[in-house]
Image: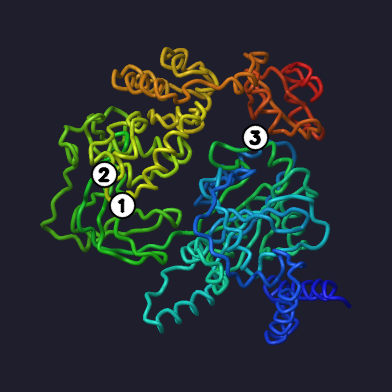
Amino acid sequence: MNAEEKINQLRTQLREHNYNYYVEDNPTISDYDFDVLLKELQALEAAHPEFDNPNSPTHRVGGQVTKNFETVPHEFRMYSLDNSYSKEDLEDWEKRVKKMVDGDVHYTCELKYDGASMSLTYENGTLVRAVTRGDGFQGDNVTTNVKTIKSVPLQLKGDYPAKFEIRGEIVLPFEGFTKMNIERVANGEEPYRNPRNTASGSLKLQDSAEVAKRPLACLLYNLKGNNLPVATQFECLEKARHWGFKVPEVAKLAKSIDEVLEFVNYWDVHRHELPYETDGVVVKVNNLQQQEELGYTAKAPRWAMAYKFKAEQVSTKLEQITYQVGRTGAITPVANLQPVELAGTIVKRASLHNADQIEKLDIREGDTVYVEKGGEIIPKIIGVDFAERDPNSQLTQYITECPECNTPLTRTEGDAKHFCPNEEGCPPQIIGRIQHYISRKAMDIEGLGGETVALLVTNGLIHNYADLYTLTAEQLIPLERMAEKSAENLVAGVEASRNIPFERVLFGLGIRYVGETVAKKLAKHFKSIDALAAASFEELISVDEIGDRIAESVVEFFTSEEHKETINRLKEYGVQLKLSEAALANQTDTLAGNIFVVSGVFHKVTRTELKKLIEDNGGKVSSSISSKTNYVVAGDSMGPSKRTKAEGLGVEIISEDAFLGML
């Protein structure tokens, strides 16, 4: 046997032993024997560098240093999940699902592991990229660190597709977490507070050899790709397991919400026996075609729901109520608490939401309050221990003036929050608006962060986001913590933002109620800032999904002389305030005034591409058939009840080819 053959044989052996130990939890050789084989392979690879392979088992020990983690876009967006907390929530979700799809609906129930979300990309069975969740649209490339995790296969086995992504959670098992803390305490270091944050932090360590020392595991649960060889979510889990991934065995196929609740109730009791942190159950519509029919909201899939176990609760003293001012002028009261440990973290502050919430719970300074983590993330006060209340305590008087600029607060009817109207003179509003403008989903200005924005405003260099385009490196270098290279990068980042497309600029302007999705709709409909600024209330509410509140806010924004002046300056500086020629070239009014429902499986274009074609050509996509529907585009396996409903209402049913012919 020559050197290359021996190297390949050892790699195959080590991969199999690694799989048996870290995925199957069933080692077939001793740790000593494994190390002997690994050292033999290391020696052979060192003697024959021409046979090096980045996915060799020897690379799991780490050693590469990454100073800056590259930000890369996700090919398939990583969505958040909607949460439920009761049987009624799940039943309401099931009703919504059954209104939108035909046939029986079954569910895959999986435990919701509390770790760091990860997307792994494989090509020809080889791991090529590992990317953190980030903001769902893009994340950090942490491939070098993830390769050190023993339960992540570097080379797959079986009938895997040529290219696909698989999503999961990087977790730190309790046993490994405890051992790490014992070592830290013995070395005189502070122990880590919880496994989830430690796992997440591990992925951003610069030295992959340090990551390799941590007993991280990767639990996988979701496949993404085109033309995958699976028809259901449960089959996805089985296939992934067969290809070599560590997929928890506890998943269950349920035929009804009652069976889902059996799974939920069992694990609410038995989750404490698990080796990992878990904070709930994820329920998914099992049939992948039904998932595609259900689609997504702006933030979450309609075909999945997270059921959260009851949050951990503690009591502590509320020492002081302070008030924060947001970028829109909204005032948020904050409870400053006597520090208390909750779900593995030290909690010092909690949001009190608004004046009504304070009044409803009768929360006062000096009270002993009950605190829990809503959804296990954001601390919130859920009640007061009145038995512990000081008889001399004073009723909370909500502030009447802005804590930052002393302007009298306003509160409009139907609004839960108080607002500071001093938009142009209140420092947190000025800073907050610019921070929003430079944020990742808006202008994404490289080299400029939130703290730097505050520094620029405080030093009088900028007063609004248009001022960013007048900055020079010479102005920036004298600032605290601003080296010459940092100043040049900031100016270059601002310069590059002139090419950001119009819909993201519109989102960055910070018009109240105009989020990312609304900004895209408005940009697509009006095509330029001038047309949008000139639009009447009636014209705005005629746009799909634009209601009274959004329309009023847009009209109000463009009546402000300050806003008009700022936008004129942005135009002068070359910021994109209309759709590009390329974007306009892909849009027509061919389908204007028509509402389409898309159902079934398509062959020439994907369902997503078909919906985009409808919208790009002026049509509207609806999820359900009604008397207002003009066409149903029917693919293979269209549900019989949808067909019956369309025929009953006299809605025209057309094929994929007929639809493409309309264009």
Q: Secondary structure at mark 1?
A: loop
Q: Is residue 459 left or right of residue 549?
A: left
- Is residue 266 visible to the viewer in this orientation of the structure? yes
Q: Secondary structure at mark 2?
A: strand
For the N terminus, the image quarter is: bottom right
- For residue 481, the mark is 1
**Residue at position x 48%, y 31% from top?**
504
Name the front one of labels 2 and 1. 1
Marks 2 and 3, how far apart in space? 42 Å
Type of amino acid under label 2? Gln
- Vertical relation: 102 (above or below) 377: above
For disc 2, the marked residue is: 324
Q: Nearer the viewer, residue 348 or 132?
A: 132
**Residue at position x 22%, y 49% from top?**
322
Q: Position of residue 580 (x, y in %)?
A: 56, 22
Please identify the quarter of the rendering in which residue 595 is found. top right
* Mark 1 Cα shell of 10 Å, populated few (<14), some (14-19), many (≥20): few
Marks 3 and 1, how far apart in space? 57 Å
- Vertical relation: 390 (above or below) 514: below
- For residue 99, the mark is 3
Q: Position of residue 199 (x, y in %)?
A: 51, 65
Marks 2 and 1, how far apart in space? 26 Å
Type of amino acid under label 1? Arg
Q: Earlier in the sequence, mark 2 or mark 1?
A: 2
**Residue at position x 32%, y 49% from top?**
482
